[in-house]
Image (tube, grey):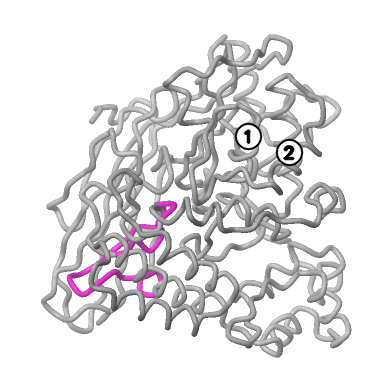
């Protein structure tokens, strides 16, 4: 973590009780449901969440058992308690390594790593870990994350190979073309391209008893005018399918198939769509504070558990924003500050009780964590924000990944995109300097958005816990015996860019 970020955060943290109490209704995690209509007894759940966050798993498990023995608990409270037991199981799937395991993995890249070097990096927080019931357990991706967090460790590798990165993380000709096309054509949506995408979800062999029905949800594109249009279903395996309506904020294709002994259960969907790039030429002097209408009000409020205006969040915001009043310049300051947080491979979102708070303090964050942090900070400053997520891909067919980004509202421009993980670009001397802020008001079109919000119910809804109750990018599956977690699933993307005029029927 940079010195400036550490200083801005300060040393004090708000006690978690307030935001955890507000979050308990949301902790019907598995369904990804909206909060309305839930009846969760916070007195039963809040202390257990606190115990789990503190690493007291045995005590939490005993408390869950006692709470579930109460005959008058609501079904929602029972479900929330059951999820906390599942959350502990998932945390233990993420935190699997001992200190010796971490050393052994790091030594594959740094053969002469000393115990003193490990201790120094460990003390600096570069190896994410938790103390769970007295055992120090390290995150399974912490050895590889080290090289994204420490320039010193990166330089000590015996073999200096580049770290993997997306094609859009450095200024390139595609971003330049979007910028110039938008300015030349006096429009914000430009350079349409037609893409055919096949998404596959695979359930491990014998994860479900033979003959039992496996239900699957594969993400499906949002219909977003000016961003992704003319969506056309092509085929699926199995053929029978149900596409969620365009109103679904986390859109999916629902499929069902019987499990066969000794065989993987494979689902897929193929579709076509037209993707448009965006660039909004924002003049900071024209941006004004927007009157918050009833339509915008939900986008400036807290939304526990992951968008909460904690004391630490307020202190960080004051440090970064200072006396600035212009909404766009406030957004630039906060965007730049969050962009300083190094990217690292993330633990599962369903295991984290407050993602924006986690991103503020962990010293690293992935795309969704950075996005939720930036959304929280912007909302704290009265700037409306909303979530978007899906996947990104390359033109050459060699790279794809799941990815999260968002939108902010700036009057008089309206909703404009932001991608803080791709972040600030570095224009060459011959480039327009405005390209530095391309991803604060612009977006490339090598991405597909599946979700226009986080933590929303599928249509049709799952009957068991969601594997990811925040996001929806990889796909989900279940059977009558329960959810099929990510350790039982695999996913894949396969795509081709089509001639511009091909297959433009809308759905």
Relative to 409, is 43 on the left or the right? left
| Label of residue 325 in the image | none
Residue at the extreme bottom of the image, as rendered: 100
Task: Say what secondary structure mark 2 lies in.
Answer: helix
Is the Cβ of the residue at disc 1 closer than 8 Å to that at disc 2? yes
Looking at the picture, tell me which residue is in the foreground, 331 or 184.
Answer: 331
Task: Say what secondary structure mark 1 lies in.
Answer: helix
| Residue 443 position within the rendered picture, expressed as x and y whole percent measured from the top left | 57, 31
Give, as a single range, the part of the protein colored magenta. 465-489
As measured in the structure, the alpha-carbon distance from the residue carrying label 1 to the one carrying label 2 is 8 Å
The residue sitting at 29% across, 42% down in the picture is: 271
Question: Splitting the image into 4 quarters, where does residue 123 fall?
Answer: bottom right
Q: Which residue is mark 1?
A: 380
Of label 1 and label 2, which has the lower sequence position?
2
Numbered disc total: 2
Q: Measured along the vertical axis of the image, is residue 390 above or below residue 493?
A: above
Q: Is residue 485 visible?
A: yes
| Residue 385 position within the rendered picture, expressed as x and y whole percent measured from the top left | 54, 32
The residue sitting at 54% across, 41% down in the picture is: 405
Q: Which residue is mark 2?
A: 317
């Amino acid at each position: 973590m940079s010195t400036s970020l550490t200083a801005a955060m300060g040393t004090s943290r708000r006690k978690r009780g307030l935001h955890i109490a507000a979050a308990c209704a949301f902790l019907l995690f598995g369904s990804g449901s909206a909060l309305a209509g839930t009846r969760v007894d916070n007195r039963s759940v809040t202390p257990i969440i606190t115990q789990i966050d503190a690493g007291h798993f045995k005590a939490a498990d005993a408390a869950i058992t006692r709470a579930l023995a109460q005959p008058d608990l609501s079904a929602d409270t029972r479900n929330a308690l059951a999820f906390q037991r599942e959350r502990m199981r998932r945390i233990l799937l993420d935190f699997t390594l001992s200190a010796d395991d971490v050393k052994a993995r790091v030594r594959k890249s740094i053969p002469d790593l000393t115990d003193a070097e490990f201790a120094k990096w460990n003390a600096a927080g570069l190896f994410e870990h938790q103390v769970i019931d007295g055992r120090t357990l390290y995150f399974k991706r912490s050895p590889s994350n080290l090289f994204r967090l420490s320039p010193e460790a990166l330089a000590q590798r015996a073999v200096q190979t580049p770290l993997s990165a997306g094609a859009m993380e450095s200024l390139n000709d595609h971003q330049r073309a979007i910028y110039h096309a938008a300015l030349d054509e006096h429009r914000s949506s430009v350079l349409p391209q037609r893409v055919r995408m096949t998404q596959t979800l695979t359930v491990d062999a014998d994860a479900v008893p033979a003959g039992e029905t496996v239900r699957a949800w594969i993400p499906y594109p949002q219909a977003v005018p000016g961003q992704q249009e003319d969506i056309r279903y092509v085929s699926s395996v199995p053929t029978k399918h149900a596409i969620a309506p365009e109103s679904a904020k986390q859109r999916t294709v629902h499929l069902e198939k019987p499990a066969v002994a000794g065989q993987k259960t494979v689902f897929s969907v193929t579709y076509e769509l037209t993707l448009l790039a965006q660039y909004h030429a924002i003049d900071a002097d024209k941006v004004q504070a927007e009157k918050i209408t009833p339509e915008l009000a939900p986008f400036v409020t807290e939304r526990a558990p992951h968008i909460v205006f904690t004391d630490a969040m307020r202190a960080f915001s004051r440090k970064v924003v200072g006396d600035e009043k212009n909404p766009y310049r406030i957004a630039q300051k906060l965007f730049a500050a969050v962009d300083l947080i190094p990217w690292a491979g993330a633990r599962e979102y369903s295991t984290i009780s407050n993602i924006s708070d986690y991103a503020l303090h962990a010293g690293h964050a992935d795309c969704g964590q950075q996005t939720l942090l930036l959304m929280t900070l912007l909302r704290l400053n009265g700037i409306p924000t909303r979530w978007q997520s899906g996947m990104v891909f390359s033109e050459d067919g060699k790279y794809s990944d799941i990815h999260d980004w968002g939108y902010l509202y700036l009057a008089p421009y309206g909703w404009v995109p932001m991608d803080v993980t791709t972040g600030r670009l570095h224009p060459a001397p011959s480039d327009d300097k405005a390209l530095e802020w391309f991803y604060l008001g612009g977006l490339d079109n090598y991405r597909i958005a599946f979700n226009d919000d986080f933590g929303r119910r599928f249509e049709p809804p799952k009957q068991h816990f969601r594997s990811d109750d925040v996001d929806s990018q990889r796909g989900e599956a279940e059977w009558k015996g329960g959810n099929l977690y990510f350790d039982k699933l695999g996913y894949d993307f396969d795509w081709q860019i089509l001639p511009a005029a091909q297959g433009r029927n809308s759905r």
